[in-house]
Image (cartoon, rainbow, N blue to C red):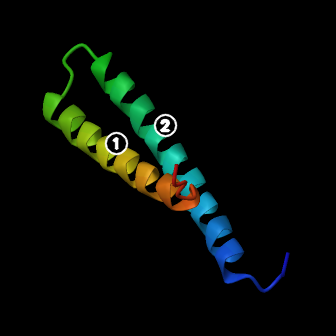
Amino acid sequence: MNDDDPSEDADISIERRLGVLREDHKDLDDAIQALEQRYQPDMLQIARLKRKKLALKDEIGRLEDLLTPDIIA
């Protein structure tokens, strides 16, 4: 392939961003679990983290769709 292919650079950039988002998603999941294990969990904080985690999941899905070519059957 051509080393100057901008679409390949974009794919690499997207894959890097996906890696960061997946790591953030896992960190939020761990934080939520830790908060839920407390004697008196802060339900408001848990709800905020869950919303943030869902937003990350949506962003991950959107970026994965960019990497997946459309296949017309």
49 shown above or below 6 = above
User: So how many labels did they put on this image?
Assistant: 2
Between 33 and 6, the one lying in front of the other is: 6
Residue at the far front: name it. 73
47 shown above or below 7 = above
Residue type, numbered disc 1 = Lys
> Residue drawn 24% across and 13% down?
39
Q: Residues within 10 Å of mark 2 (few under 14, many from 20)?
A: few
Image x and y of residue 34, in percent: 38, 24
Q: Which mark is residue 53?
A: 1
Between 14 and 47, the one lying in front of the other is: 14
> Residue drawn 65% across and 76% down?
7
59 displayed left or right of 67? left
25 displayed left or right of 67? left
Choose the circle earlier in sequence order: 1 or 2.
2
Residue at the far left: name it. 44
Which residue, given by chain and number where applicable, does mark 2 sit on?
26
For label 1, the SS is helix
> Residue drawn 23% across and 32% down?
46
> Residue drawn 31% across and 49% down?
55
39 shown above or below 8 = above
For label 2, the SS is helix
Residue type, numbered disc 2 = Lys
